[in-house]
Image (cartoon, rainbow, N blue to C red):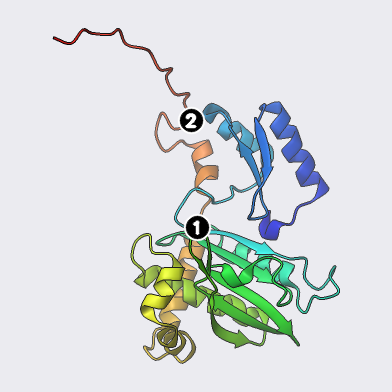
Amino acid sequence: MKGGVTTPAQLRKIAEVAEKYEVPMVKVTGGQRIDLLGVRKEDLPAMWDDLGMPSGYAYGKSFRTVKTCVGSDFCRFGLGDSTQLGIDLETRFQGIESPAKMKLAVVGCPRNCAEAYVKDVGVVAIGNGTWEVYVGGAAGASVRKGDLLATVSSAEEVLTLTGRFMQYYRENANWLERTYDFVPRVGLDTLKQVLLEDSEGILADLDAGMQRSIDAYTDPWGQDGKQPATPGQFRRSLPLVELPKVPVR
């Protein structure tokens, strides 16, 4: 459900699959997706086939989701088409691996209905086709407003700058270091010099590195559904057996 956008046909399919496989819980997530929770392991390959949808990337150290508001089409306050830009971002970067998870959001105005200011990358429409790009935000145990990396004049520039930031983060962050720790450690001024002024002469390399990852990406669970990574990947777990008590001597 890219950008949190769905259709009646997609919802109908999800409902049919949830009923067919007796899914214990169907839940709307904070990332504007639908979770099917409590699924039996052995049912997963058949469920993926029946759904015909990609997985939600909620399991790895990777690009996760792009949360969006309804933007300019259905909101009188909207200054930009945040929904389409969120879909474009997710389509381009879906599932890209990284040192830690990356959550994004795009909002159509500074009212911030999709919480872009506290995401790893947040994009805010400010009118006349311009967008602010924030990095290093957090809304978990420690709350941190993202730092304004740049103001750009088109959605295409948002895609380019987002890709460069994420690739620089992928190449230079420590394992499990979220962007809200990475950005203060490296420094906003340094990031601006590298990503906006090309002070290190690496922008072309960042673009190329990200494109290689995009070109090489495959949905891991969709692939494993057809050919399991291990013989027991989708096999039912053995039942626990209570062992007889042995007296201690």
Instruction: Report the residue marked by disc 2.
Output: 234
Tell me which residue sits at (67%, 42%) in the image.
27
Instruction: Pick whichever, 175 or 228, lies toward us.
Output: 175
Q: Is residue 177 visible?
A: yes
Upstream in the sequence, badge 1 or badge 2? 1
Q: Position of residue 84 (x, y in %)?
A: 72, 68
Q: Is residue 50 above or below residue 68?
A: above
Instruction: Report the residue marked by disc 1.
Output: 217
Q: Which label sits in the foreground, 1 or 2?
A: 2
Relative side of 176 to 21, left or right: left
Q: Secondary structure at mark 2?
A: loop
- Label 2 near label 1: C-beta < 8 Å? no
Instruction: Pick whichever, 64 or 110, lies toward us.
Output: 110
Q: Secondary structure at mark 1?
A: loop
Q: Is residue 209 visible?
A: no
Q: Position of residue 45 (x, y in %)?
A: 56, 34
Q: Quadrant of the C terminus?
A: top left
Q: Is residue 196 above or below residue 213?
A: below
Query: Which amino acid, by three-letter code, is at mark 1?
Result: Tyr
Relative side of 112 to 209, left or right: right
Q: Position of residue 95 (x, y in %)?
A: 52, 57
Query: Which amino acid, by three-letter code, is at mark 2?
Result: Phe
Tell me which residue sits at (41%, 68%) in the image.
170
Residue lying farthest left? Answer: 249
Circle 1 Cα neighbour tier, 10 Å, few/some/many (<14 / 14–19 / ≥20): some
Q: Which mark is residue 23?
A: none
Relative side of 86 to 38, left or right: right
